[in-house]
Structure formats: C-alpha cells, structure tokens
Amino acid sequence: MTPRPESSGSHPEQPAERQPAAAEPVKKAVAKKTAGKKTAAAAKATTKKAATEKATVKKAAVKKAAAAKTPAKKAAKKAPAKKAPAKKATAKRTAPKATPAARPAPQPAPPETEIAVSPAVDAADRERLLSGTHHAPHSVLGAHPVPGGVVFRAFRPYALAVTVVSGGLTVELHDDGDGFFSGLLPLGEVPAYRLLVTYEGTVQETEDAYRFLPTLGELDLHLIGEGRHEELWTVLGAHPMTHQGVTGTRFSVWAPNARGVRVSGTFNFWDGTGFPMRSLGSTGVWELFVPGIGEGELYKFEITRPDGSKTLRADPLARRTEVPPATSSIVTSSAYEWGDEEWLERRAEVPAHRAPFSVYEVHLPSWRPGLTYRRLAEQLPAYVKDLGFTHVELMPVAEHPFGGSWGYQVTGFYAPTARLGTPDDFRYLVDALHRAGIGVLMDWVPAHFPRDEWALAEFDGRPLYEHEDPLRAAHPDWGTLEFDFGRREVRNFLVANALYWCEEFHIDGLRVDAVASMLYLDYSREPGQWTPNEHGGRENLDAVAFLQEMNATVYRRVPGVVTIAEESTAWDGVTRATHHKGPSGFGGLGFGLKWNMGWMHDSLQYMSHEPVHRRYHHGEMTFSMVYAYSENYVLPISHDEVVHGKRSLVSKMPGDWWQQRANLRAYLGFMWAHPGKQLLFMGQEFAQGAEWSEAHGPDWWLLDPNYGAEADHRGVRDLVRDLNTVYGHTPALWRGDTEPSGFRWVTGDAAEDNVFAFLRYDSDGSPLLAVSHFAPVVRQDYRIGVPDDVPAWHEVVNTDAARYGGGDVTRPDPVKPEPQGRHGFPASIRLTLPPLATVWLRPA
C-alpha cells in the first residue's frame, strides 16, 4: 500500500481548550547557602545563568514586532546538551494560518520565580518512550507547569525541528536528539498552543496529541473493569470525534499484559514510535486521542509484549477492515439513515415461536458472485419475497481472512466483511430487506477464533481472549482457539458484540454457531485431554453462564430479536428461560429457538433409503414427535447438509431423476407441515443437483428457459413458493408449533404403506390435514381418519401437481367424510394417494 502523509486528516481552525496539566516531577536546583565556597559559587552561577535565560525570553516577547521582520534561521548545529535549552527559545513573530485573533497571549511567570529545571525528558522516560514501554507518556510529553514556567516536550522521530505556536508567539524547541524536543518558557500557566513540525521538505502545523485529557470517563472504565459495558464498541476501537474542541480520532484497546502500546497507521507512515498510548489505571485499557485524522485512515496497534518483543495487531473492536487478505483496521463512523422504522415497531408484536417463520439461508459472497451489498439489496429482497420466505439467514458476515471458512473463523467480530462493501453498505442491505417485509438473521460465532498472528491469538503476548490452559484453549476439531468464557472482559467483548449487530445493524436474530462445542468440556476430547468442572462434571459452567448472560441481555435490550442455538445434543433447557431451573439443576440457556438436528438427521436418513426399504426405517420419521415439545425448534436443511460429499438435497434422494424430484417435493411438503420452523439453504429451492461451493454459488443456469430441464427445476421452486404462501395464511401450521395441542397423529404406524398422516391445529381448533406417501405407487381409496365436525376437505397443496413436475394425481373437488371410523376418529375420508407425494387438505 502507499502510505499517506501525516497531514491526511483535517486540521481544526479553532483554538484548543486549555488542559489542566498533571503534576510534573522536576529536578530542583535552587541555590542554597552552604559552608563550602565551591558550593556557593556553583549556586551563584546557576542562578545567574537561569536569570539570563529568563531575560532573553522576556526580551524576545516584548520585541515581537521587530522579531517579525527577521526570518527564522535554522540552527547550523545542535546545541550541546549541557547548555540551557531555554536560551534557544527566542520568540519570533510569525503569522500562523490557524491562529485566531482571539487567542490569549501567554502570560509570563512572576519575576520572583527562579527557573532551575531541565526541560529535557530524563533518561529513564526517554528509554521507555523509545522502546515502546511507557505507561504514561502524557505525564512526560506535552506542556506542564513547573517551578519557573511551563515546560514543553515533544517526541517527533524524523523531525528536523519543532516549534511551539501560541497566540502571536513562536518558540523553537531544543533538539535533544532521537526525536525529542524540549523547551522551558517563563509562563504563568499552560497556554493554548499548536506545534509546527519541520520534516525534510515539509512543515506541518498540528495539535499536540499529548496535551489532551483522557477521552474515556470513569464510568466507562468502571464498567469495562467489571465486564459490564454493554456498549463496548462505543468506547474501544477507533472513533472520530471532537475532543476539547479539536477534531481527531480516539484510539483505545484492551491489552492488560502489554508493557506498552503504540498506534501505527497510514497517518504516521506505519511507524508508531512517536504515538505511544497511555494506560488508564488497572483496567488494562490503553488510550490516545490523535488530532487531525479521521475516517479512512488505516491503523493497527503495536504492542510490546511482556518479554519485550513487539507485535502488530488489528483492532479487536475495529468496525471496518481492509479487504482480505489485507488485515489493517480502518477508522470509520456511520452516517446511514435508516428507513425501517415500521418494521422495527412490528417485529416485537408476536414472539418468533408463535409466528410464521420460514428461513432462506444465504451465503452472501456466493449467492450471485460479484454482487456488492448494495447490488444484493436490488436483487435478494425481491427474490426472497417472491418465494414467500419470512426471513433470510446470512452465513457469518463478520470479517474473516479465509473465504473457504464461509465466515465461521472470524477475526473481525465487529466488522462486516469488506469483500462486499462498507459497513453502511451492509446497513443498506438490511434496510432493503426490512422494507420488503423480510427479517434478517445472522450466524454468529462466539465459540472460537483462528490463530492468525495479527488477530486475537495471544493478543498482548499472553493468552487473553483464549483460555490460559492449553487444553481448554485449543479446539480439537478446527485448529482454532476457544474463548475464555470465564474471564469477565472476554464475556463482555462477546455479549457487547451480540448487541452490536442487533442495535447497530438492526439484525433481527442471531443463530449461534457450535453451541454444543461450548457447553461440554470433553467435546471432541479423549480422556485425559480435559479437566472436570468444580462439581466433577463435564459441563463448561463458564460457557453456560456466558450464554445465559448473552441471551438475557439481548432480549432485555432489543425487543423483537430472537436468538437461535445450533445445539446438536440433548442439553436440557436450551430454549427455557434462564431463571427457570430444570431437572439437571441448571437454569435454561435462554434461547428463543433451537435447530432440531435430530429431526434433520433422521428424516434425511429415511429419505435416502429406497422406498422398498423404508418400512424398516419408519420410526426415523416419527421419532421427532417424541421430543417435539421439549424445545422451540427450527427444522434445518442448511449448508452443512449439502457440502463435503454429502450431496445436494435432491441428490440424496433414491431413484431416477423423476423419482428424485418427487421424493424431494414430498419431503418438503412433509417438512413444512411438521411442527417447527423451516430453514432451507440456497440452491435447494430449485433442486440443484451439484453440491454447493463458495467458489461459484448456486447453479442459476438450471433456471434458464433455454435449458432443456428448466421446467423440472422451476417446478420445485414453484412448489416452495406455494408451500410458503399456504403456510403463511394457515395459522394451524405455525401458531401451535411449541404446544402439544397443536398436533395429533392420524396414522404414524402405516409402515407397510410408507404413509404418515397428522393434523395441525390453530388455537381456535381450525385444522389442517397433512398426508405424506413415500412409496412410488398410486394408492386408490386410501382411508384416513378425520374429525366428524368438518363437513368437507379441500386439497390446498399436492406435491404431485403437474405444474411442479409431478404426475398430476390430484383431486380438485372437495372430499366429504364418511361415518366410518378410522385411526381412532369417528369419521374418515377416502383419498387417492399420489406416488411419492405430500397432500395438504383444509376444511372446505
């Protein structure tokens, strides 16, 4: 990259506010009377020398007009270190462009005050500043009142000269070597001032970064220290702001083990030597306000580790990053104006588990490769709305270095991936989906993070975000590091991150990835590779507490948002309230919904069998109803099921091409009628035959009218649209998803016939009858038991319809019950069951 000069930011024109200076330790050399003549003579010489320096500066200040006519001369050689540097501080009248007329003139010190202070940075501070290990650079650099006046110190590596500009007075500081400049002015108080910094070929006028008070208040620091700052992103990271009347950027980072931290970026040619940050007490937070720079600047933090080595790290709280594989953080702020107020007002009216909820899962970079966030906003909402899905679920959009991870190995937890545009561009996409009436869910990955040396791993030289125990830190499956959920600052980092996406980007729900790997200490570990908890169990109590805190905080702060757990075990109470304890003694985890991995695995296993063998696996389709109301479930056919040799959804089905499509259509009809919410991964809605690849995305060419089999794929997509349409208008299919009263088997044991029939009920008793037939034959006059209070039933969905690519074994006319009992019901209807099809019927 091409570094930009230090003046790339804007320069404020107004005078800076005065800053109360911190106490400055000084080396007093006031002459004292002693018995020895040699001591008395030395004291006399010192006093005389100091008086001469004061007189020189005072005389220069009085004769400003004369000095203005004489151009400033550059010193031919540096003054010896033992000579008083204040002698060089001769005032010269200039006309600085940023000096307002109202700026008060500096006041001279009282004449009786004796100057006996060396203004130069002492050896110890000098060494710490040069080595990047100073915890309090503001206590040394900047302007500080001392006996006899005000001392000015600047640390500007590579500068040829540094001049203090205050009112109409300019004072060139003494060059102390190694980039240090200092001077002592006989002033009564610290004035408003700026610095003129001379480099080879250029002179820059700037504010002094080391004259500013901290930008973080005591309450912020207290909350950070307690791990309870719910808006952490507003105080850590890089924030353009106006501080003490000056525009610039506040940098702050948590690095408690660091011996020193400096900020490095395009504004200082990636040399952070002259930009040391200060440590703010015991919080582990380092801070620096850099005046004159703003949005668009690239930066990282240069951290001096406990062993003295250095590492250059991206900002953990960066809200914008470079496009991978570049890794720098970018100073940013949002100016986006939202237009989704109506959506936000409505989304909290009905909880997700009692509302229609069908989800289209999308990998944004490959949905239609090459589209940016804003181009996606032109196409994705219209496509999803046409198919009738209520929500999209975005695979992780947080920044990640490797595209092949699909976003599940995150390095920039607070930054939408720059591959597709800026953070405001991502806001534009979310806004467009909301205005189209579509909710936005996002995959969120708090379980682990990659080991990249420029990111979170051993961030400040020691385990920080990861657990200090190597057995607890290393994830056995993915080569990544697990978060230390027991550390309050780490928990704060993640809880605030969940809130950040919901509040800053209006995300409607977080699907939390890999929850099972968080909950168990022995997850994918052999005996001897894990240590039991304090009770001797395998549960990760820290992770449990974190998930409970995250869910409770999100639901408290963001009405209408839903959290969804990808949890593949039988953990008790994933969707139970956190304050309700279950049989295991744990409170609930507090999620709103949970992926039903058992249903997904069992039903796909059943469908993969040849129909002639399915009667031996009938229970794989009915077992889900044994536990259907133990949690609030989503039925997921996700990206995980159509990659890595698992084949696409239609390719999992047995038989020839016609049977594969028929099986798929019947399965989708069964899925949409089954208790639970639905999720379908992109490409499966039109029966893509190939596995998904992030390199090229769905095979959209299958829907090209010029393609011979286009009708076969379009038929499946038309079915998905109709399933969503009927589903959305039939409360029986979603209002009672989590209530046993919303479901009743008609026949769940017709294994010989490969038939499943059940009723779904609305809260007012309105039913829908779903009959799935997974045999490749037509069954005439198949008798199905029904309630006797429905005068007639009308077919509303038949997956064998010709428009979907089926054989069109349909029944357009209503069917009336007969008083012949069947399946425990007082009445029954006779149906012609199409081959490999699902039929939905409603009261006519």
Image (cartoon, rainbow, N blue to C red):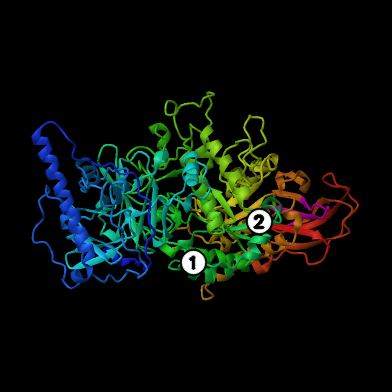
Front label number (2 vs 1): 1
Give SS at disc 1: loop
In the rendered image, residue 529, in percent from the top left (x then y), is placed at: 42, 29
Give SS at disc 2: loop
Residue 713 visible in the shown view: no
Sequence-wise, which precedes: disc 2 or disc 1?
1
In the rendered image, residue 461, in percent from the top left (x then y), is placed at: 32, 40
- Of residue 270 and residue 457, the one placed in the foreground of this image is 270
What span is in magenta? 759-779
For label 1, the residue is: 335
Residue at point 46% right, 41% down?
490
In the rendered image, residue 84, in percent from the top left (x then y), is placed at: 15, 50
In magenta stretch: residue 770: yes
Please tell me in which quadrant of the rendered image residue 630 appears: top right
Badge number at residue 357: 2
Residue extending furthest toward the bottom: 706
Residue kind at label 2, given as amino acid type: Phe
In magenta stretch: residue 179: no
Q: Residues within 10 Å of mark 1 (few under 14, many from 20)?
A: few
Residue at point 38% right, 63% down?
294
